[in-house]
Amino acid sequence: MLYPSIDKLLNVVDSKYMLVHVASKRSKQMMETGHYQMRINNYISKKDLGRALEEVENGLIKVVKK
């Protein structure tokens, strides 16, 4: 089972497309800068994409519609 759940994430972000876009952009930022919004030990996921999804779930990334 994947963590975090897609159902929980879609409560934060309106569409799957937007979720993929936000998570991929944030994971690339993590790889390039090495900056994380939580302590490394607090993440459940070991990969940056999963960590980006965890940040979305925890409300650390704000999704703004244009």
Image (cartoon, grey):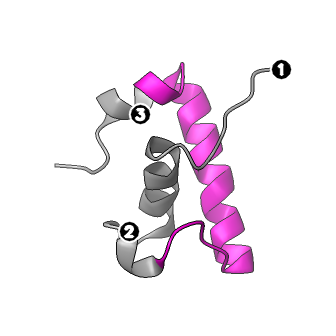
Residue occupying image coordinates x 41% and y 34%? 9
The image shows residue 45 at horizontal and vertical percentages of 34, 66
Say which residue label 2 marks.
Answer: 43
- Disc 1 residue crowd, few under 14, some 14–19, many 20+, Cα 10 Å: few
Disc 2 and disc 3: Cα gap in Å?
Answer: 16 Å
N-terminal-most mark, 2 or 3: 3
Find the distance from the CA under tag 1 to the CA under tag 2: 30 Å
Q: Which residues are magenta?
A: 11-39
Assign a secondary structure to mark 3.
helix
**Neighbourhood count class around disc 3 (C-alpha, 10 Å): few under 14, some 14–19, many 20 upward:** many
Badge 1 element: loop
Kind of residue indicated by mark 2: Tyr
- Inspect the image, locate mark 1, and give the three-letter code of the amino acid beneath it: Lys
> As shown in the figure, which amino acid type bears the numbered disc 3?
Leu
Label 1: which residue? Answer: 66
> Which quadrant would residue 47 be assigned to in this image?
bottom left
Q: Which mark is residue 9?
A: 3
Q: Earlier in the sequence, mark 1 or mark 2?
A: 2
Q: In the image, is residue 28 part of the stretch drawn in magenta?
A: yes
Task: Tally the marks.
Answer: 3
